[in-house]
Image (spheres, rainbow, N blue to C red):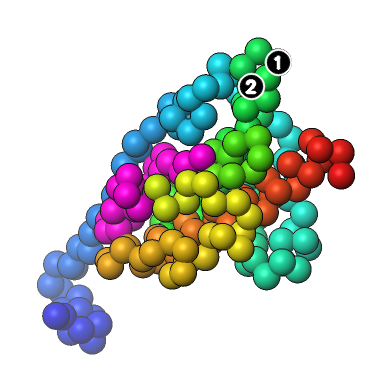
Amino acid sequence: MITRRQTLQKLALGAPPLVWTAQAFAASFLSLEQAQRALLPQASEFVEQALVPDVAALRAAGLGVPAGYAPKAWLARTGEAFQGWVLLDRVVGKYELIDYAAGFNAQGQVSGVEVLVYRESHGAEIRTPAWRRQFEGRKGPSQIRFGDDIRNISGATLSCQHVTEGVQRLSALVQGLVKAREGR
């Protein structure tokens, strides 16, 4: 390993400068439309829905909310029959953003989680069906706890934790959407 001091000494003596390279990694796995169809296959139409997260309520529920939190939502239906929602969000893995979508049925239970874009060089194991299946059927943030309900994958700890926390937040938002639809 060359120290900063050695590099500066070489530059002072006229040696050619060292070139540092950074390796970028990003993989797109699904489009939004593909994720919507995978998460709620019975739906024939997805209509974007305005979603204004109640950040104060999320924080009061003990959920961390990152700066600039702005998930997007689509209402899923078949004809006039309501099927549920698909929400799109992004979280930071270890250093880079992870774009993912979560589907929720009409009762607010998670129907699935799909990773759309993964930019980290390690930890893409969160895309495995077995890990993502852990979310299915869970309802509300109290049923989506990292380390208790959702297990970790060695080498992908931060990606697992941050996606789990993201799905917790989305689940809390969907519980509000369910109450609004029921007129409570």
Q: Is residue 126 magenta?
A: yes
Q: Quadrant of the N terminus?
A: bottom left
Q: Quadrant of the C terminus?
A: top right
Residue 134: assigned label: none
Where in the figure is residue 69, as x and y percent of width and height?
A: 64, 53
Label 1: which residue? 80
Q: In terms of secondary structure, where does tag 1 sit?
A: loop
Amino acid at circle 2: Arg
Q: Is residue 144 placed above or below 104 in the rendered structure?
A: below
Where in the figure is residue 42, as x and y percent of width and height?
A: 52, 22
Label 2: which residue? 77
Distance Cα–Cα, label 1 vs label 2:
6 Å
Q: Is residue 85 magenta?
A: no
Q: In terms of secondary structure, where does tag 2 sit?
A: strand
Where in the figure is residue 157, as x and y percent of width and height?
A: 36, 67
Residues at badges 1 and 2 in contact (C-beta under 8 Å)?
A: yes
Amino acid at circle 1: Glu
Q: Nearer the viewer, residue 139 or 77?
A: 139
In the image, taking residue 29 as reference, residue 85 lies left or right, namely right
Q: Is residue 27 placed above or below 5 in the rendered structure?
A: above
In the image, taking residue 111 as reference, residue 66 lies left or right, namely right
- The residue lying at 47 percent from left, 41 percent from top is 112
